[in-house]
Image: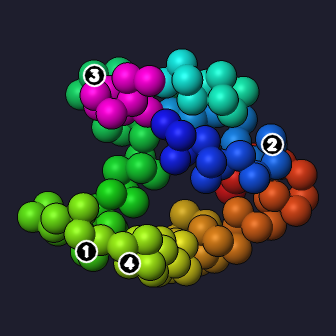
Amino acid sequence: MEGIISGLSPLPFHARRSITFDRGFEFLAWPHLQAGLGVATWFCDPQSPWQKGTNENTNGRARRYLPRETNTTALTNRNLAAICQRLNATPRKCLGYRTPAEVFREKVLAGAGPLP
């Protein structure tokens, strides 16, 4: 949770108002995250991946670079940053063929508002 807190803390509050988790064991310390960031936390219903469609889509995209058999402990921060950059620089139909990075930057600078 400390990694998530340190990664999201620099963002303006309107860019991190809530976080939705799946029901994985790794999110057991969600109260610490909620207190550390001052955000609302939500959990998907069991076996309901459609409740986090963007997450499921992004997981599928990430699997192109990180197949299930990948030893993630062998990855460096540089490797992970490169994968994140590729994912965030890929235009998406649901964003009007803009990239997630473009839309996020636009929304942060605009001071919030719903995503398209």
Q: Position of residue 8 (x, y in %)?
A: 65, 48
Q: Which residue is mark 1?
A: 64
Q: Earlier in the sequence, mark 2 or mark 3?
A: 2
Q: Amino acid at mark 1?
A: Arg
Q: Quadrant of the C terminus?
A: bottom right
Residue bounds of the magenta highlight: 21-29
Q: Position of residue 46 (x, y in %)?
A: 27, 22
Label 3, secondary structure: give it.
loop
- The amino acid pointed to by label 3 is Pro
Q: Nearer the viewer, mark 2 or mark 3?
A: 2
Give the residue displayed 90% in from the left and 58% down from the top.
110
Q: CA distance from mark 4 to mark 1?
A: 14 Å
| Residue shown at 24% from the left, 61% from the top | 73
Numbered label attached to residue 24: none
Residue for point 61% across, 53% down: 7
- Provide the secondary structure element on which disc 1 rests: loop
| Mark 1 vs mark 3, CA separation in Å | 26 Å
Callout 4 crowding tier (Cα within 10 Å): few <14, some 14–19, many ≥20 = few
Which mark, by number, is residue 14?
Answer: 2
Q: Which residue is mark 4?
A: 79
Name the spot of residue 109 as percent of width and height, x first: 88, 62
Mark 2 or mark 1, which has the lower sequence index?
A: 2
User: Which element is circle 2 on?
Assistant: helix
Which residue position is annotated with label 3?
46
User: Residue 12 magenta-drawn?
Assistant: no
Out of 116 and 90, give the one closest to the viewer: 90
Residue 34 lies left or right of residue 28; in this view the side is right
Looking at the image, tell me whether mark 1 or mark 3 is earlier in sequence order. 3
Q: Residue 78 sits in which quadrant?
A: bottom left
Select label 2 or label 4 by which is in front.
Answer: 4
